[in-house]
Amino acid sequence: MQTETAENLAPEERDLLDWIVAEAERRGNVVIQVPRDDKGSGYCFTACVWALHQVPEAVVIGLPEHMAPILLDAYVDRAATGEPFTPGHVYDDFFEGASVTFERVALGHYPEYFGCAFLVYPDGDFPAVQIIVATPDGKWPWSEDAPEGFAEWQPVLTESGRPESWTPGIDGP
């Protein structure tokens, strides 16, 4: 696994990188949780998945704290064994009663949503997907009848802030 060289890192960054690598080697991935703050929703992302499995790193925004790591671990387990995940396709088998879809993350969102992954990938050269979760009644952040504030709670991490790998209602949810 190619990572940032030790001489370029502050001691706390070196410690964090060592922990990330050790956890990834132990578990097959690392899930980093970032709590909600006054700027937005909490989110979780993976690190080392691309390095270990050649599977895109993933982020999920706005899920309850206990659910996001479960979703990311399930994604990694399934993707690492060869299951493909296509942007715009709806998957109903991650959580009972909640559909998910995938979208590619625009590079401009990497620093904010994959911060410490840059310790593993110093040049930012890794693919990433966002796992987007519908409301229990099937509303997506871009749905006209989505709950008020849902698009802000679970922003879509593309350049436009809307799905770009498919057209909602035509070839995607």
Image (cartoon, rainbow, N blue to C red):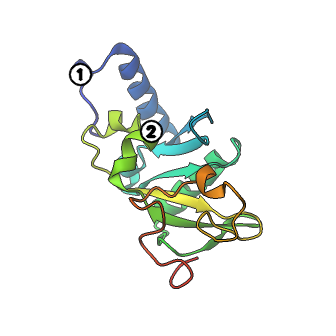
Residue 103 coordinates in the image, percent (x, y): 47, 64
Identify the disc placed on residue 25.
2
Give how far apart the Cα atoms at labels 1 and 2 are: 23 Å
Residue in view at x 63 percent, y 70 percent: 143
Q: Quadrant of the N terminus?
A: top left
126 horizontally vs 142: left or right: left
- The crowd level at tag 1 (other Cα within 10 Å; few <14, some 14-19, many 20+) is few
Give amino acid for label 1.
Asn
Quarter of the view holding residue 122: top left
Q: Which residue is mark 1?
A: 8
Residue 162 coordinates in the image, percent (x, y): 48, 65
Q: Is residue 157 above or below residue 85?
A: above
The answer, for residue 73, to whether it is visible in the render is no
- The crowd level at tag 2 (other Cα within 10 Å; few <14, some 14-19, many 20+) is few
Secondary structure at badge 1 equals: helix
Q: Is residue 88 above or below residue 79?
A: below
Quarter of the view holding residue 101: bottom right
Give amino acid for label 2.
Glu
Residue 142 coordinates in the image, percent (x, y): 58, 67
The answer, for residue 103, to whether it is visible in the render is yes
